Image (cartoon, coloured by chain):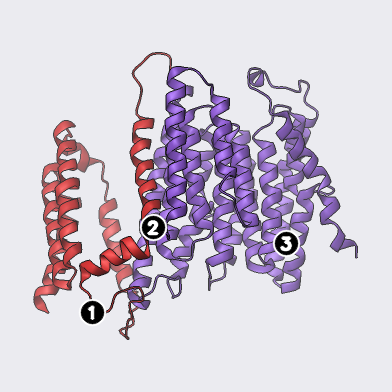
Amino acid sequence: MFYNSIVEIDLCFGLLLLIIFGLLSLRNGHTSLPHIRFLCQCWLISLTPLEVQDIALCLLTVVILQSFQSFEALLFLLLAYIGQLYMMHATNLVSFYVCLEAQTLCIVVLCGLLSRGHGTSFSVEAALKFLLLSAMVSGMALFWFSAMYQRTGSLDMIGQETFWILLVMLFKLGVAPMHLWSVDLYGSIPKSLLLYLSTAPKLSLFTFWASSWHHDYSVGVFILFSMLIGSIGAYTQPALRSLFAYSTINEIGLLLLAVETAGFHTLYQHLSIYIITQLLLWNLTDKRLFALCAVSLAGLPPLAGFFGKAWIFWHTVNMQAFSLLVAALFCTVLSLVYYLRVIRLFWTASVHTAPSFVGVQHQTTLTSTCAVALAFAPVMLVKPFLL
Amino acid sequence: MFFENSSILLCALLSVAVVYTKSPFMSLMYSVMLFINSSFVLMMLGFEFLALVNLLVYVGALAVLFLFVIMLLEIPATELRAYSRGWSTLGILIFLINGLFQVNPSTGSRGIVTGLHNAEVISNMGHALYLYFADILILNSLVLTVALFGAFAIAPVRTAGR
């Protein structure tokens, strides 16, 4: 038993050392938060991730750690990272559930934690809503896990109850018609947590889906729901956050279309483009870059978002799912309306930096890297279309 | 057969009664009776360890927790009932209608893949927890740490200017 769990013991020991070091040094005042943050990032990299998705999650968490200001937030991010890392390689229902709960609980605590400095009750309300809904949905998942175990005697994800467990996974991804928690959450949490929430859980859940989850049911209904609600729901939203919440639902619908028709390589390609866009979006201080993000999300060439969508639609044509393709194209056209509105508003804005951004530290390296990646990634993605 | 079925029926009746009573204290009492009944049903099914753990955790910890909550917060009983507006009735009706469309579980042979042959329940539980799922046990301890540490971290701090 010791040798089975030696990796986790090593992880926990490292985390314990980090906690002790952080608490002692913050109390004495000898070192400051950037040093502790650097140590956390080193701990993440020192776990030697083996596969591409592990490396992607590690790099993503290292980048996201940069945006957080309090020590407890860093710790909960690291704990969520452990949960996500093990979820991506889970083959058993029990391990999937424990890792899912680890990730969800850490996000709930982070929602409640980051509201103290701002003094608003929105984050507490968001944390409470997310906790109650996800606890109920996880309870439902556990019921169907036990039904599957009762019927087949094994915990290896075979059986007819996969539809209900698929529902639970889609809830955590934020797929319509179970999307209301994500719309509420997007408006109420601080930007750094929003950045984390819209990238890392999706990466880990989709990797789990790609590696160990066999779904027998078509997700076509969820694709249609997500794309319609994502494209039409954003019309009446006055705030930028809720607009991009609905655009996220639209993108998740597109990623589900990739799962349905295109295969997981296309899914990972579009997901990585989406993650880079989100990293750019929520770290911005210059208004014109919002327009760049919107162009990429809308899927207009020559930015990278176009090629992600083009690949998915090309595979849909190959699989001859023409009704899904027509619906997806229709919803893309509908979503162009609000993207173009964002582009027009932000590109021609008179003041390029909003006054609320004055005191915030600028992460120019990150934003410039993401902007360059979005603008020049098509060079690597366009080749199959030209041949 | 009649005895087992009537115990399960008592479970259902008690859980409906938890929702429908007017006073929170009677609701708690019904829920304690429900916990004891569920532990009894588990014992009849042959899960002795689970029955004892249920009794310990649910009655010993959760019911006492709810008792303290009811003691410390003075909940006016009439307000609880006034706000309910028939959702509980709707929920029960939907549950009954759903019950008519259930898939019948197969009664074929079941093989428990991860169990020890000819061992008792407790030995199987120990084998599963500490040998087969040993790494998940440690991950689970991380989840419990998050729950505990998170409750401390979210709690409002009384010092000024933090």
Q: Nearer the viewer, mark 3 or mark 1?
A: 1
Front in this rendered view, residue B4 or A345: B4
Residue A127: x and y, percent?
Answer: 42, 38
* Residue found at x 49% / y 52%: A172
For the view shown, which residue lies furthest in the right direction? A387
* Residue found at x 64% / y 42%: A235
Q: Which residue is mark 3?
A: A312
* Residue found at x 68% / y 37%: A281
Image marks 3 and 2: residues in contact by CB distance under 8 Å: no
Q: Badge 2: few (under 14), some or many (20 or more) residues near its Cα, within 10 Å?
A: few
Chain corresponding to red in the figure: B
Q: Badge 1: few (under 14), some or many (20 or more) residues near its Cα, within 10 Å?
A: few
Q: Which residue is mark 1?
A: B118
Q: Nearer the viewer, mark 1 or mark 2?
A: 2
Disc 3 with disc 1 on a shared chain: no
Q: Please state which amino acid type lies under the numbered disc 2.
A: Phe
Q: Which residue is mark 2?
A: A2
Q: Is residue B37 left or right of residue A125?
A: left
Chain corresponding to purple in the figure: A
For the view shown, which residue lies furthest in the front direction? A3
Front in this rendered view, residue A322 or B65: B65
For the view shown, which residue lies furthest in the bottom direction? B108
Q: Secondary structure at mark 1?
A: loop
Q: CA distance from mark 3 to mark 1?
A: 53 Å
Specify the quadrant that holds the N terminus of chain A. bottom left
Residue B110: x and y, percent?
Answer: 32, 81
Q: Is residue B34 left or right of residue A166?
A: left
- Chain-order first, disc 3 or disc 2: 2
